[in-house]
Image (cartoon, rainbow, N blue to C red):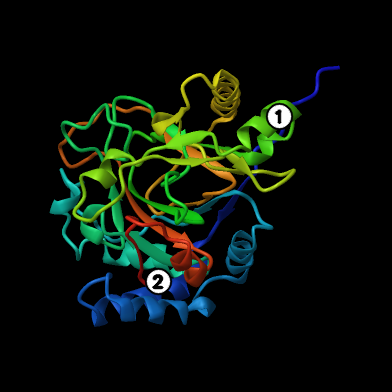
């Protein structure tokens, strides 16, 4: 009898309006007190509102932080009443006030998982980033593409200081374009020879173009790292669009190609509606996106993004030269 494929490590929690009422009340008060959601004092205040979240949600979030929970978590809630306005044509053009309540929900949940960090090289060093299509970048392998698949990847795989968890909140997704995910649990049957090859520091990972054209400084030279690490249940460091092997290292190249085919075949679509929040363990899962046809009329897919670290002190200590990850807790 043929063995079934490993089940992807994904969980979903659906909250009721009653369960989100206390959090929504707290968010309304905070929106009235602060001019911007990038205020660091506001983040500190949010951490104090753990009791505003339902216990069954905070239990799930604790599991994510300990890495004992699922690698991918979808948190669905009743659609928020706040109108975010049209999807901007560029992240620079977003109105700060429009997304305030949504940003605070994203942050209130996220700070129970990890400490928010950001990059000087991405979106002007803003804490909250926008994932939306930008005209002229339709075919890029970045969060601003559209008509092509965004290939699966680990967020900021090129850097040792990459986030532990990626948090994505949906503001608009009229076409229900899927975020695609695959988890490391689906690699349990990778052969010993491939596992050994993939665990060697033989893979050159480059920064993606968004970092290189930003206002900060990221070293454009590749880092040579393994793409699997961490023992019998491996962690992932995979970004096929920006990864190469050394000339002549055909064995590593073939092993990497097999790994990528395996992950591509394991991808699962996650379709987010407004208010839905997706938490992805950046060491135990990869993510990408289905293609879609942008309209550039204010109705396009729009997500807000936070990147989270479990240990800010350790993260700061391992930062390599040229990296500009900023701690904003």
- Rendered location of residue 244, percent (x, y): 44, 28
The residue lying at 76 percent from left, 26 percent from top is 4
Answer with left or right where residue 193 lies relative to residue 252. right
Q: Nearer the viewer, mark 2 or mark 1?
A: 1
For label 1, the crowd category at 10 Å Cα-Cα, with few meaning under 14, some 14 to 19 and many 20 or more, is: some
- Rendered location of residue 235, percent (x, y): 62, 45
- Rendered location of residue 273, percent (x, y): 40, 45
For label 2, the crowd category at 10 Å Cα-Cα, with few meaning under 14, some 14 to 19 and many 20 or more, is: some
Residue 191 seen? no
Front residue of 18/187: it is: 187
The residue lying at 26 percent from left, 59 percent from top is 120
- Rendered location of residue 199, percent (x, y): 63, 38
Q: Which mark is residue 59?
A: none
Answer with left or right where residue 8 lies relative to residue 203. right
Q: Which residue is mark 2?
A: 24
Residue 77 seen? yes
Q: Is residue 290 above or below residue 310?
A: above
Q: Which residue is mark 1?
A: 190
- The kind of secondary structure element at disc 2 is helix
Q: Earlier in the sequence, mark 2 or mark 1?
A: 2
Answer with left or right where residue 195 lies relative to residue 217. right
């Amino acid at each position: 009898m043929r063995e079934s494929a490993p089940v992807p490590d994904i969980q979903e929690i659906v909250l009721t309006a009653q369960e989100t009422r206390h959090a929504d009340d707290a968010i309304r008060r905070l929106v009235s007190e602060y001019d911007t959601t990038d205020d660091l004092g506001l983040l500190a205040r949010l951490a104090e509102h753990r009791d505003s979240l339902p216990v069954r949600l905070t239990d799930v979030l604790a599991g994510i932080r300990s890495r004992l929970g699922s690698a991918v978590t979808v948190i669905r809630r009743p659609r928020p009443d706040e109108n975010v306005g049209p999807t901007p044509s560029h992240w620079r053009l977003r109105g700060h006030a429009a997304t305030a309540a949504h940003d605070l929900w994203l942050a209130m949940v996220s700070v129970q998982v990890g400490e928010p960090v950001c990059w000087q090289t991405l979106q002007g060093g803003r804490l909250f980033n926008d994932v939306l299509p930008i005209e002229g970048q339709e075919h890029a392998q970045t969060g601003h593409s559209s008509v092509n698949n965004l290939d699966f990847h680990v967020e900021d795989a090129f850097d040792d200081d990459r986030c532990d968890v990626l948090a994505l909140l949906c503001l608009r997704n009229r076409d229900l374009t899927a975020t695609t995910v695959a988890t490391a649990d689906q690699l349990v049957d990778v052969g010993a020879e491939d596992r050994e090859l993939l665990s060697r520091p033989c893979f050159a990972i480059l920064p993606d173009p968004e970092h290189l054209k930003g206002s900060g400084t990221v070293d454009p030279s590749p880092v040579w790292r393994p793409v699997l690490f961490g023992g019998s249940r491996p962690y992932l460091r995979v970004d096929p669009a920006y990864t190469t092997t050394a000339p002549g290292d055909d064995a590593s190249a073939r092993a990497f190609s097999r790994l990528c085919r395996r992950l591509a075949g394991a991808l699962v679509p996650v379709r987010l509606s407004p208010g839905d929040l997706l938490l992805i363990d950046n060491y135990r899962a990869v993510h990408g996106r289905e293609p879609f046809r942008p309209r550039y009329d204010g109705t396009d897919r729009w997500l807000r993004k936070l990147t989270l670290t479990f240990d800010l002190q350790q993260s700061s200590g391992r930062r390599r030269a040229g990296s500009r990850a900023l701690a904003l807790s």
